[in-house]
Amino acid sequence: MPLDIIIGTQWGDEGKGRITDLMAAEADVVARYSGGDNAGHTVTVGDEVFKLHLIPSGVIHKSATCIIGNGTVVNPAVLIREMDALKARGVDVGPGRLKLDSKAHLITPAHIAMDIAKETQRGSGAIGTTQRGIGPAYTDKTSRVGLRAGLFADPEGLAAAVKAHITEKNLMLTKVYDAQPLEIEPVVAQFAQYAQRLRPHLVDGSVYLNEALDAGKSILAEGAQGTFLDLDHGTYPFVTSSSPTAGGALIGLGIGPKRVGRIVGITKAFTSRVGSGPFPCQLEGALASRLRGTGANPWDEFGTTTGRPRRVGWLDMVMVRHAARINSLTELAVTKLDILSGLEQLSVCVAYELNGKRIGYYPQDLEQLAQCKPVYETVDGWMEDVTSIRQMADLPENAQRYIRFIAEASGIPVTFISVGPGRDQVIYG
Ligand code: IMP
């Protein structure tokens, strides 16, 4: 059985947790491969809403084993909190069920302090990070001074490494950023406790996952963030510090490309972005408020991790095509189609105009991107509530046209359409 990969085709918050939850019903193993608790995945099962940041959304299915892969950065305090919250709701998060790759990097309070200090120093040029220590933890990884989860199996090595790490970061915090230092001993003691709790969960993820594939099991790689937050292929520097793209899934799990089956691109029926950076199709005013929602519902456009209101805009097919190319998408899942009900006309960006010329690609240069004006095609909307529809043929004619438009403009078939937050509110294309 293959490795199937779920990828966000926009700036994150496409509804990946929701599609992961559906696909996880068929998977033996669900794996997170990049990012950390900057992600926020919401899954609604009946009346219950699960908000997960670190543990794969597949944990809610009793049958799937979950693994946090080597490409992630893990704040152990958040992981333990999330495990306790799930356990209190009757979800098994024991070592047989939830595994942590020894090569995953750890986020410490010093990484969080550095994230905040760097953002403060950037002032008006701030990236708008989630302030979860993601960038500083990945910086340490690439500088080859990071702390890996495998240290949990070596109490003395862990204490020495944490001590040296906080000492070095304190120098940076006080001398470079004029920020407060951290007390070293309490962090060392905290990490000793985390080690006791998390040690039984450690595995060599690549060995575990490849053995699972060899045994005929199926693996679902659950993406976090989205293609346009990718360190290489996104809107640099307004990106995250990892590779939330299909290539990143392979590196972040230690699995080779020949094992890959489906690569599902999750595309929200409109676009959203949280944090700074260019957004050619961004809308303001009443229409933006209408797409964003009020924040009263868990699925409204407010950050799951930070609560920040998201910037919103029309669907941008230039972005979706860029994501299709980078990730070799085999199919698309269109989410939140129900939110567009009641709008008389919908615009879809099909190209950009740059210096008077029409272009069909996403410029990598941010100055050029800032000058791009969206070229819209307008399509008729639909008034009907679609939340109880389960067959493509029962969707209003204009909603069907909208889906066909997305498939044709991207060249990728649409295989899922979600029409509400509930597990059953889906149409299989
Ligand atoms: P960081 O990942 O916290 O360093 O944040 C870098 C950028 O990525 C900021 O613009 C964040 O808002 C954005 N970001 C990180 N994680 C997510 C996510 O899960 N959804 C949407 N945006 C995210």
Image (spheres, rainbow, N blue to C red):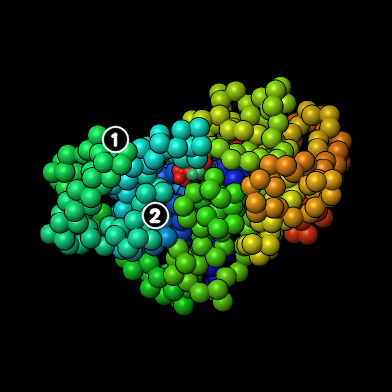
Residue under label 1, please give it. 178
Residue at the spot x=84%, y=50% of the render?
358
Q: Position of residue 107 (x, y in %)?
A: 32, 49
Of the residues under marks 2 and 1, which one precedes in the sequence? 2
The reply to whether dot 2 and dot 1 touch (C-beta < 8 Å) is no
Q: In the displayed image of the protein, which residue is found farthest to the front?
A: 175
Q: Quarter of the image holding residue 72?
A: bottom left
Q: In x, y percent, where is residue 51?
A: 46, 39
CB of mark 2 near ligand 1 (< 8 Å): no
Estimate the spatial distance between the alpha carbons at disc 2 and disc 1, rounded to whole Å.
22 Å
Give the label on residue 369, or none. none
Give the left or right position of residue 302, taking residue 382 as reference.
left
Kind of element beneath mark 1:
loop
Mark 1: C-beta under 8 Å from nearest atom of ligand 1? no
The kind of residue tagged 1 is Asp
Q: Nearer the viewer, residue 172 or 387?
A: 172
Instruction: Residue 367: give x, y in percent of width and height.
Output: 66, 45
Amino acid carrying mark 2 in the image: Tyr
Secondary structure beneath dot 2 equals helix
Looking at the picture, does residue 216 appear above or below residue 400?
Answer: below
Position in image of residue 173 (x %, y %): 28, 41
Quadrant location of the N terminus? Answer: bottom right
Q: How many neighbours does mark 1 have within 10 angstroms: few (below 14), some (14-19), or many (20 or more)?
A: few
Q: Which tag is nearer the camera, tag 2 or tag 1?
A: 1
Residue at the disc numbered 2: 138
Residue at the image point whose x is 33% and y is 68% from the top: 204
Rendered view: 332 above or below 423: below
**x 63%, y 29%: residue:** 292
Residue that appears at 32% across and 38% down: 177
Q: Does the rendering let one see residue 199?
A: yes
Residue 65 appears in view: no
| Left or right of 20 on screen, residue 149 | left
